[in-house]
Image: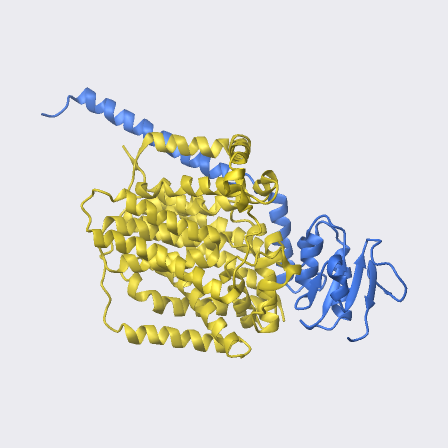
Amino acid sequence: MEPPPRALDAKTRARAARLSLAAIAYAVLAVSLLSPVQPAVTKTRLERLGSALRGDPTYRPENMGFWFDADYLAFLDDLDRRLPKTPALTVAVLVPRNPDLYRFQANYRLAPRRVVEERWKDEADAVATYRTEAGRGPGGEPVAGGWLWTRPSR
Amino acid sequence: MTLVEALSRALVGLAGATGAGWLVSRPVTWGLTRRERFAWALASGLLVQAVALLALLAIGVRPSGWRLLLLEAIAGGLALAALRRRPEAAALERRADSSLLAWLLLGVAALAWLVFLGESVADGMWGTDFLAFWGYKGKIVFLTSGLPRRLFQDPALYFAHREYPLLVSLSLAALAAFVGRWNDQAIALLYPVCALATLLALSGFLERRVSRLAGAGAAALAALCAFLYKAGNAGTAEIPFALSAVLASSAAIDWLSRDRAANPWRLALASLFCAALKQEGTLFAVLLAAVLWLKTRGEGLAPRRRRLAVAALVLPALAHWILLYLLRGNQTRRDFDFTLFTPERWRELPALFALVAGRFLRIGWTEALVPILAIVVIFLVTRRGMAAPILPVFPTQIFFYAVAFTVSSFDPLYAIDGAFRRITMSLFPAFTLVLCSRETR
């Protein structure tokens, strides 16, 4: 037997209400997922991409990785130029302990050289210091933001 | 070399991998939508490309784009020759609904993906995990044309997670070989391409199994997940892992609903991809196996079929672990203090677990209350859909994250604040399969 029209109406209305509620919940979920978006940062990044694609000579891609210390990039670049690019070379890089990105950036940017911390400096062919008193001594040469000591070949 | 040229070369690398992956995965993806097949092709292709790279390194030949393409072509050709017969066809079950809303949602997903694409390649990758290990290892492999033992044995690399799987690093190294230099801006293209494959897999699978609207909704929700698809995550393993979790979940749902020879193979392929990306990937595959086993108890399925599914999920992950063990030797898990599991220290566990659970709840309450409530409402006003059986995998995976943080070697709160959001959100795209396959009642 068919249910009476009024019961059908109530069912249809209840289903429509549930559908609407579900649609609102999906929409709220979608909007809440966007909460980490920072439109100004996104805009800046897209503009930087635009300048990179246009071949802007002032563009450098590494800026974001040095948010903790903008000068550190120049130090690592200088080391990169001065030290032979070989995995056989060990360089001790003495940098501030915090944030640990100082160490990670040194390892990453100076690869394939072996980069070590102060505790392994006896194994190093070169010692570089940046914004730290450690490793001070005669015979070093200044590099951007720090000093570099190289040992004669062992 | 201009950025456009470097990006084009990286794109050739990704296209080559996808082409080889298309041929290799063809026998097990027949009958899926083209979008799903693209996602499976990329996953298979990244595995093929990594094997090709390792083969070149093993024989002491410097990897280049041409050499990798040649090996990929050989792998694709062999797969084609081995399976000339038309593979078993699973009938496509397209749902012929084509609402304006579905197109609108696909437009939203496309727009969100384009923004992520632009953000990912706007700079060199700079995430902490990229610099410390994923990218670092890839750069060492590329620059030395080898897999130096130092990566696994040098005490000075104590922070570089020597125990982690290598697929991400090998993929980055392979793309660098195509670019011809280590250009961490161009090779970041891997991430938007993985994101695209994830969105295509979601929309293709749900369109095939539920409706176009469900597929478009899942793709839009996943694409809008700015916790996952953000520039800072380019360079980590989270975005490829999200793809692997979607593929594994969709294969599991297909296996549950029909008995086809290709299904266990897809489970196996997804399991290998999961395990090769992240340790959490192995956990995901094992949990999926447990859920499939438990959920099909007493349903009259042939025991052989159930055992085959479990084996398909567990054995590739196990084989990958053994291979990695042989490659790099035994590695301590620096992240964990397993002495907490010894009887003398059991008493410390409840307090530590309570601390971790409290932090999880606090993050949920202060940062994710609105999305959690929205998900609760969706569950209340809709009926379980065809993906419901795999739902327990997600809370169980998060429970194991809590266990892992409990036995962390570091301050658990520090570890949670550093990783919890990222690793949890990498499950979200796969979770949208459950969320968007639910039915209105």
Rendering colour (chain B): yellow
Number of numbered tags placed on the structure image: 0
Residue in the image at 67% along x and 54% along y: A65
- Picture coordinates of residue B94 (x, y %)? 26, 51
Q: Nearer the viewer, residue B123 or B85?
A: B85
Query: Looking at this view, is B372 or B103 the one in front?
Result: B372
Q: Quick check: B109 left or right of B383? A: right
Residue B275: x %, y % from top left: 43, 56
Residue at the image position 48 percent from the left and 31 percent from the top:
B370
What is the x, y in percent for residue B382? 32, 33
Of residues A139 and B70, which is closer to you in this image? A139
Quadrant assignment for the C terminus of chain B: top left
Question: Which chain did the renderer colour blue?
Answer: A
Q: Residue furthest left?
A: A1
- Considering only vertical position in the picture, is B349 above or below A90? above
At x 56%, y 51%, the residue is B233
Would you say residue B184 is visible in this rendering? no
Residue B18 quadrant: bottom left
**Up/down of B269 relative to B142, above or below:** above
Is residue A67 shown left or right of residue A131? left
Q: Quadrant of the N terminus of chain B?
A: bottom right
Closer-to-camera residue (B122/B256): B256
Q: Position of residue B149 (x, y in %)?
A: 58, 68
**Farthest-out residue, front:** B344
Specify the farthest residue to the right. A138
Indicate the colouring scheme. Answer: by chain
User: Do we see residue B218 in this rendering?
Assistant: yes
Q: Residue at x 85, y 53 (%)?
A: A133
User: Is A30 on the left or on the right of B441, as rendered?
Assistant: right
Looking at the image, residue A52 lies above or below residue B79 = above
